[in-house]
Image: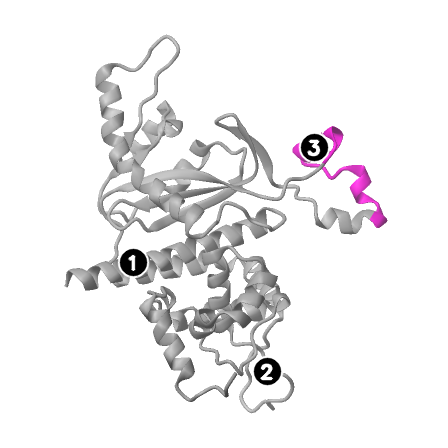
């Protein structure tokens, strides 16, 4: 093998561009510097970064740039990578290095650094604030919530717990099983998820959490989200997902959200229900109601496109965290990464139609 030439790396990047690498577009359409104040505040609150004082001596190892590590966390969410696998890919993939602005000679954040920075964002409750800040920037760019809103939820599985029946009963009651409280069981307790729950859907059992989202019909951007355990019924988060900034009053959802209190709540908030109707044992749906549901499905299907992107392009049907607090941060980063990716898609379409 010969020595690397001066233009070899640029030619390799040109080859990536010819294969339509999506990351340069993502790097260009997102104002990453806008996140810096919130990222720095979260790191300072956790002790990961000390406040800068004028005249202080720049001694010791320099901290990682907070925006660079945040971009690494977005990459991790886009491809649902573990911390160790993210570190490996940052070292191995030219597209990842270019996205972070790193050269072949530069160090990359290791797995521990990624975990610590994400934990700082988690404990500060900053992921939700970052999501809201990016939503505000979307509106500023002209991507306001329009056309009505569509609400739905999907299951995000977590590693299954191998507990005894007695241990599961204690967890459901909100208690910690006695055997897990022993000093020698501290390591075991750290690996036990006390917040995830089982749920059955279409005859299959799932264990984990739910990602409840509300998207706007026009742009298919996630505008609101809530994270709960998997056993939480979809309708319980209905009101929390409604976006009062949408330009249209129509609300679409499947029949799980249909109830008399829900219809009254929508009317009280000045919203028009486009929720699927459902029949009862002695009152089946009429032909007209079935036709109405079919019409609604053509609109409601747009939210399935979002979950389809989560499942296929992002592989975000499984998380490896323990506990609801970390699950909220992890799923929140997934929703934020989706919106960033969707923004790139919208920019591409706007450029193609110009």
Horizontal and vertical percent for residue 223?
35, 50
Label 3 to label 2, Cα distance in Å? 46 Å
Q: Quadrant of residue 205?
A: top right
Give the crowd class for mark 3: few <14, some 14-19, many >=20 residues within 10 Å: some
Furthest residue toward front:
1
Disc 2 element:
loop
Q: Quick check: marks 2 and 1 in contact, CB under 8 Å? A: no
| Placement of 148 over or under 66, stated as above or below | above
- The residue shown at (45%, 33%) is 234
Q: Is residue 282 left or right of residue 354?
A: right
Q: Which residue is mark 2?
A: 62
Q: Which mark is residue 168?
A: 3
Disc 1 element:
helix
Highlighted range, magenta: 163-184
The earlier-in-sequence mark between 3 and 2 is 2
Q: Is residue 315 left or right of residue 326?
A: left
| Placement of 298 over or under 133, stated as above or below | above
Q: Is residue 159 left or right of residue 311?
A: right
From the viewer's side, name the closer residue of 246 and 281: 281
The earlier-in-sequence mark between 2 and 1 is 2
Q: Which residue is mark 1?
A: 345
Q: What secondary structure predominates along the stretch shown in magenta?
A: helix
- The residue shown at (59%, 82%) is 62
Label 3 to label 1, Cα distance in Å? 44 Å
């Amino acid at each position: 093998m010969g020595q690397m030439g001066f233009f070899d790396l640029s030619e390799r990047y040109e080859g990536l561009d010819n294969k339509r690498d999506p990351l340069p577009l993502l790097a260009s359409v997102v104002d990453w510097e806008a996140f810096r104040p919130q990222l720095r505040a979260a790191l300072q609150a956790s002790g990961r970064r000390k406040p800068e004082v004028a005249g202080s001596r720049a001694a010791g190892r320099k901290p990682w740039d907070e925006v660079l590590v945040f971009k690494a966390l977005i990459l991790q969410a886009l491809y649902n990578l573990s911390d160790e696998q993210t570190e490996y890919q940052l070292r191995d993939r030219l597209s990842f290095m270019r996205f972070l602005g790193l050269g072949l000679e530069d160090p990359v954040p290791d797995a521990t650094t990624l975990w610590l920075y994400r934990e700082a964002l988690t404990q500060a409750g900053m992921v939700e604030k970052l999501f809201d800040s990016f939503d505000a920037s979307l509106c500023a760019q002209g991507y306001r919530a329009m056309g009505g809103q569509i609400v739905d939820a999907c299951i995000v599985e977590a590693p299954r717990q191998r507990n005894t029946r007695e241990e599961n009963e204690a967890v459901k009651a909100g208690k910690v099983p006695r055997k897990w409280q022993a000093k020698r069981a501290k390591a075991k307790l750290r690996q036990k998820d006390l917040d995830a729950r089982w749920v059955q859907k279409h005859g299959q059992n799932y264990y984990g959490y739910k990602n409840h989202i509300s998207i706007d019909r026009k742009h298919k951007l996630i505008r609101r989200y809530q994270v709960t355990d998997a056993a939480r019924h979809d309708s319980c988060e209905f009101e929390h997902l409604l976006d009062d900034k949408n330009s249209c009053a129509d609300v679409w959802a499947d029949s799980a959200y249909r109830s008399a209190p829900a219809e009254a709540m929508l009317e009280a908030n000045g919203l028009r229900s486009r929720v699927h109707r459902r029949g009862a044992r002695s009152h089946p749906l009429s032909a007209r109601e079935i036709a109405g549901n079919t019409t609604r499905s053509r609109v409601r299907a747009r939210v399935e496109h979002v979950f389809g992107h989560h499942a296929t392009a992002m592989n975000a049907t499984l998380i490896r965290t323990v506990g609801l607090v970390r699950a909220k941060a992890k799923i929140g980063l997934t929703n934020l990464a989706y919106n960033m990716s969707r923004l790139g898609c919208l920019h591409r379409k706007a450029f193609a139609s110009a």
